[in-house]
Amino acid sequence: MATTEPDPLANPGTADRVAAAFGVFTVVVSLGGIASAIALSTRFSFATDALSDLGRATWRSSTAFNTGLLVSGLCALVPGVVLVRNSRTLLHVAGSLAFSLSAVCLALIGVFALPAPQHGTVAVGFFLGFTVAFVCYGAGDVRSGARRWGLFAIGLAAVHVGGWAVWIAAGTPGGLALPEIVGSGCVSAWILGTAVRLW
């Protein structure tokens, strides 16, 4: 007889479902903001630019890009706080806090748009933060019995790191936007997966 896999996020309550909704909204706003900014820009190219170039004050795309990141980063804090509350292991706590820090950095990317000197720090914090979150939260899931979800998170971390590794090994063809879009896809997938679990 088949048995269901235990899940640390089982039996969701109202706060969990609110967090799930904020998670979905985070993905819609962030990806929507990026897509809108690309559509508005007459200068952006994946061959030469970073996604952050869309936020430059002198570019037509700046408002759509920066507002999208600021709003989505703030919204992502809601599931981050709920994940901390629901944590069963120290690994879950570490992963939840790393994700929350990454969300703060995402919002600050929209505040400290290029060429602000703080931009590089918060951008690195965003990408590094969610990668650490995937590894820690995924390891916590594996240890607590939600093995498939754990491997999913760790796999996304591997895809993200692998995307940067391939880009660097190939001689950095194109702009930073190429590995950045891989990372954006990975964090969006994890947030949506977490939203499913919280719902």
Image: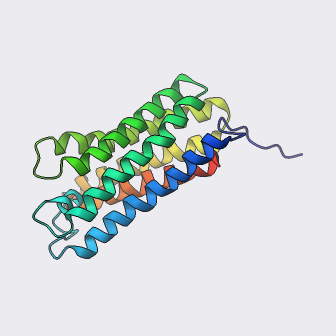
The answer to whether 100 is drawn above or below residue 90 in the figure is below
Left/right placement of residue 68 relative to residue 55 reads right
The picture places residue 137, in percent across and down from the top left corner, at: 52, 35
Q: Nearer the viewer, residue 161 or 192?
A: 192
The answer to which quarter of the image holds residue 59 is bottom left
> Which residue is at 17% across, 60% downward?
53
> For residue 129, what is the image quadrant?
top left
Q: Looking at the rendering, in which quadrant would you find the N terminus?
A: top right
Number of labels in the image equals 0
Camera-side residue of 119 and 147: 119
Relative side of 58 to 26, left or right: left
Residue 173 in sight from this viewpoint: no
List the single residue furthest toward the top: 90
In the image, what residue occupies the spot 15% across and 66% down? 48
At x 21% / y 57%, what residue is drawn?
Answer: 52
> Which colour assignment does the render follow?
rainbow
The spot of residue 114 in percent (x, y) is 14, 53
Q: Percent position (x, y) of residue 96?
A: 48, 34
User: Closer to the camera, 68 or 50?
Assistant: 68
Q: Is residue 94 above or below residue 105?
A: above
- Give me the residue at 46% from left, 28% from top: 94
**Residue 120 visible (yes or no):** yes
Q: Position of residue 174 (x, y in %)?
A: 20, 65
Side (left or right) of 91 relative to 112: right
Is 112 on the left or on the right of 183, as rendered?
left
